[in-house]
């Protein structure tokens, strides 16, 4: 049996004697001196030591990782412009058993390379450190590693030359991307910002059809001594490609006529290539709701004479949608919901819907027929008929309404709707003196109205389901003539706005506002469906539905008459703490009123938030401040704010 070299034998004997004393664990890495969370996270991710947390490490392996940490930290700071930081790394024993003594920090003599780790291997040929031949007193050491960083002066851009040569130099979208490039002269050389700016220009060239564009020069020169960087970026674009004919493929069989779908194509063959036109076609096809899969693909590799063919692959969605559900409302009582929708009745894309909402104190039947509209703006021609019977402490009303409308998507954020309404309503909410000092209900009142309405809906947010940044709102203008004698006229304007501001990934501020006014010489002749109310969900929490505003009482029953004006406002702060769960606090205020001065009612409260798979769920508890006897109210909502 060959004899082991003397020194190697001593080392093996030392480890056999020490046993588990060779092992240590790093429980935590503290990174100090870096205020930016993104920079600190990049440092932590770059550390090989971070992958070894809570693992048994030999002394040599641990010391090697500590030595590597200085280099890894330095490299992790460079993408943020810090090329000359001062880095100090310390380790300390932690959580020692009672009676054990902490060992001193590692010295240079301890920091030897691990011969078992490939490129880490190495030896100076000397004898092992004396400490390695002595058994450790603490076989279960737990260490904390502190990385202290002094960032120093960052590297700043001294010169930047970013340009495009060729036909694309005059393209508006490309020039816009060039103008938005960062970092500019004098700014810190943040490589993340630099790469994003470079990618923005490359994407603009591709989206505008410069498929032959080439990055002729891409160089960043850093002079550490001067804390300066010089950027040189230049593209040559080549000729711009053109859009070809759009070809539709419906699989497994066509359900909608091709000539109908061709009306959605918003370019003529030979037009300059623009990816925004393809995206508009895709969104128009999705909005039709005929297809479960919509794929719009440009194929520049199949271009002929720089004309790019466009392939549109479509798979039909299920033709019928059936809905069955249960409901409960504090006003309407328990109920059921039944519905059926036909996504497409024929190859012309007509749709039909029938829906029944049947609750104890509210019944509604809705019938709807829709025809796709492509002239001027994508949208729908819609005819709907709705019958509603509602009797509760707030209202006694029965109405039938026919609506003919035309909707149109003006742009990515603005949708317009023009409609004509024919309304017949019977209601009872007013009272009169019965001649004996009491009040008695008036007979039912009737009114028939014909009026047009214009509505604009604007939404510009980062996420429609759970917005954190942006704004949205609606503006409604309607007016006409009617009443019992046909001589009552009215004109209404009603606006709602919402604004979202995210402070970070887990918190945001929400501001809401509402204002409405009715111009009419005989407001009491207007039916309840044309009046304004306040109170309840999405209005002033802390008060019941429609509770705020004019009211009358008859034999203990309260009738809320509605008003010609409404104004509400809300401030809400929302924060998520762990996973999908969060909380909110809010203040709401508002009133439905007659005259010029509102009788403002304010409610305060808090709520629970849950980001469920089907949308945000909000449960709020609120209390009105108008009266010391005001009860607490519970409010529940599910779905998007907008």
Image: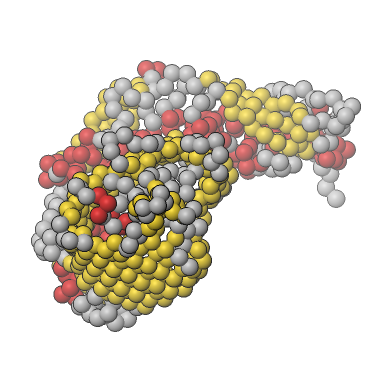
Pick the residue in front: 290 or 174. Answer: 290
Pick the residue in front: 377 or 435. Answer: 435
- Is residue 254 visible in this depiction of the protein? yes
Q: Quadrant of residue 582?
A: top right
Pick the residue in front: 92 or 179. Answer: 179
Locate residue 121, reporting x and y percent: 65, 38
Which residue is pictured at 50% across the width and 63% down the height?
Answer: 333
Locate residue 439, reporting x and y percent: 40, 52
Locate residue 209, reporting x and y percent: 19, 53
Which residue is pictured at 79% across the width and 34% down the height?
Answer: 141
Residue 437 vertical placement versus 373 (above, below) = above
Count of residue discs? 0
Which residue is pictured at 46% across the width and 73% down the height?
Answer: 324
Drawn side of residue 205 relative to residue 603, left or right: left
Q: Quadrant of residue 119?
A: top right
The residue at the far front in this view is: 436
Drawn side of residue 570 relative to residue 475, left or right: right
Residue 452 vertical placement versus 153 (above, below) = below
Locate residue 170, reporting x and y percent: 12, 41
- Is residue 243 visible in this depiction of the protein? no
Which residue is pictured at 63% across the width and 29% down the height?
Answer: 30
Drawn side of residue 641 relative to residue 66, left or right: left
Pick the residue in front: 621 or 360. Answer: 360
Residue 1 vertical placement versus 290 (above, below) = above
């Amino acid at each position: 049996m060959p004899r082991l070299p003397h020194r190697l034998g001593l080392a093996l004997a030392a480890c056999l004697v020490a046993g588990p004393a060779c092992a240590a664990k790093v429980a935590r890495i503290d990174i100090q001196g870096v205020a930016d969370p993104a920079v600190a996270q990049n440092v932590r991710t770059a550390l090989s030591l971070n992958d070894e947390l809570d693992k048994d490490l030999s002394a040599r392996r641990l010391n090697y990782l500590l030595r590597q940490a200085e280099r890894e930290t330095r490299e992790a700071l460079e993408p943020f412009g810090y090329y000359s930081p001062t880095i100090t790394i310390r380790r300390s024993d932690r959580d020692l058993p009672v009676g054990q003594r902490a060992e001193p920090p590692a010295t240079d003599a301890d920091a030897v390379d691990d011969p078992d780790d490939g490129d880490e291997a190495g030896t100076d040929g000397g004898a092992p450190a004396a400490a390695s031949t002595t058994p450790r007193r603490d076989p279960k050491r737990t260490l904390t590693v502190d990385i202290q960083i002094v960032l120093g002066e960052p590297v700043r851009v001294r010169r930047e030359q970013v340009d495009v040569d060729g036909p694309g130099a005059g393209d508006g979208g490309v020039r816009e991307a060039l103008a938005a490039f960062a970092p500019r002269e004098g700014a810190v050389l943040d490589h993340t910002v630099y790469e994003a700016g470079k990618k923005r220009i490359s994407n603009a060239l591709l989206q505008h059809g410069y498929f032959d564009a080439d990055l002729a020069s891409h160089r960043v020169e850093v002079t550490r001594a001067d804390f300066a960087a010089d950027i040189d970026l230049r593209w040559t674009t080549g000729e711009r490609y053109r859009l070809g004919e759009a070809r539709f493929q419906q699989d497994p069989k066509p359900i909608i006529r091709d000539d109908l779908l061709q009306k959605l194509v918003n370019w003529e063959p030979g037009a300059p290539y623009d990816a925004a036109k393809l995206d508009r076609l895709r969104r128009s096809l999705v909005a039709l709701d005929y297809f479960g899969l919509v794929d719009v693909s440009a194929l520049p590799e199949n271009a002929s004479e720089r004309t790019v063919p466009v392939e549109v692959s479509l798979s039909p969605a299920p033709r019928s949608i059936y809905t069955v559900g249960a409901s409960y409302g504090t006003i309407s009582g328990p109920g059921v919901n039944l519905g059926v929708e036909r996504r497409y009745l024929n190859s012309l894309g007509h749709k039909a819907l029938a829906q029944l909402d049947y609750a104890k104190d509210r019944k509604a039947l809705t019938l709807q027929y829709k025809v796709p509209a492509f002239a001027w703006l994508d949208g729908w021609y819609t005819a709907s008929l709705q019958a509603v019977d509602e009797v509760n402490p707030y209202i006694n009303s029965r109405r039938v309404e026919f609506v003919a409308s035309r909707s149109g998507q003006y742009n990515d954020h603005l949708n317009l709707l023009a409609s004509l309404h024919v309304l017949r309503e019977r209601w009872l909410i007013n009272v009169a003196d019965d001649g004996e000092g009491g009040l008695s209900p008036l007979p039912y009142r009737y009114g028939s109205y014909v009026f047009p309405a214009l509505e604009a809906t604007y939404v510009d947010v980062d996420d429609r389901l759970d917005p954190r940044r942006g704004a949205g709102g609606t503006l409604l203008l309607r007016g006409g003539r009617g009443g019992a004698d046909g001589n009552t006229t009215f004109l209404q304007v009603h606006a709602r706005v919402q604004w979202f501001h995210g402070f970070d990934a887990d918190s945001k501020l929400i501001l809401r506002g509402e204002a409405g006014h009715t111009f009419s010489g005989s407001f009491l002749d207007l039916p309840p469906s044309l009046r304004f109310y306040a109170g309840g969900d999405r209005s002033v929490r802390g008060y019941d539905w429609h509770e705020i505003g004019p009211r009358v009482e008859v034999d203990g029953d309260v009738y809320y008459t509605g008003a010609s004006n409404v104004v509400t406002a809300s401030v809400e702060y929302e924060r998520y703490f762990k996973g999908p769960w969060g909380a909110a606090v809010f203040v709401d205020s508002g009133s439905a009123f007659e005259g010029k001065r509102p009788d403002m009612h304010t409610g305060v409260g808090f709520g629970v938030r849950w980001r469920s798979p089907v949308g945000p769920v909000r449960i709020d508890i609120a209390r009105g401040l108008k009266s010391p006897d005001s009860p607490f109210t519970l409010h529940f909502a599910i779905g998007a704010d907008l």
